[in-house]
Image (tube, grey):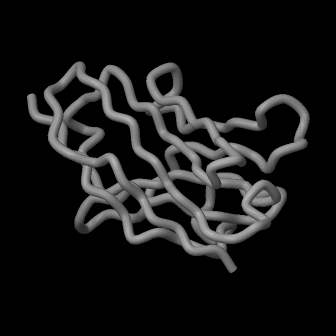
Amino acid sequence: QVQLVESGGGLVQAGGSLRLACAASGRTFRTYAMGWFRQVPGKEREFVGRINYSGWRGDGTLYADSVKDRFTISRDNAKNTVYLQMNSLKPEDTAVYFCAAGPYGARGAPSDYTDWGQGTQVTVSS
């Protein structure tokens, strides 16, 4: 099990950028696939992107079409942290953003992930 804490959310104007961070506890962080999801009230949790565990071929990133070419996921295993760099933000990106940890093979379904953070609010004004 791994504990996850997100940070970096806030209010930003459309077209702006934010970087979210997710700090993880545990010595086995580098073995987890790390995902980002978002959720707005009344809607299901939506997949944003995932970076595979270290050692996988390439960087093993996967993105939702809605954020591709705008958002970038990276990880720093020395700091047990995964990042979500969000550029060219749009009002429709407003949501609570969650990071999640999962095993090898985790992709875009929330059920692929076993551990979740509490979330951080991102609000994009028009």
For this rendering, which residue is in front, 106 or 5?
A: 5
Residue 56: % across, % down? 88, 41
Dividing the picture into quarters, in which one does residue 102 lie?
bottom right
Quick one: which residue is furthest to the bottom in this view? 1
For this rendering, which residue is in front, 8 or 121?
A: 8
Taking the spot 45% from the left edge, 65% from the top edge, the residue there is 5
Relative to 61, is 52 above or below?
A: below
Dividing the picture into quarters, in which one does residue 120 lie?
bottom left
Taking the spot 25% from the left edge, 29% from the top edge, the residue there is 90
Residue 15: % across, % down? 23, 19
Give left or right: position of 52 versus 87: right
Taking the spot 19% from the left edge, 35% from the top edge, the residue there is 91
Quick one: which residue is furthest to the left in this view? 126
Residue 100: % across, % down? 57, 63
Q: Quadrant of the C terminus?
A: top left
Taking the spot 47% from the left edge, 29% from the top edge, the residue there is 71
Q: Quadrant of the N terminus?
A: bottom right
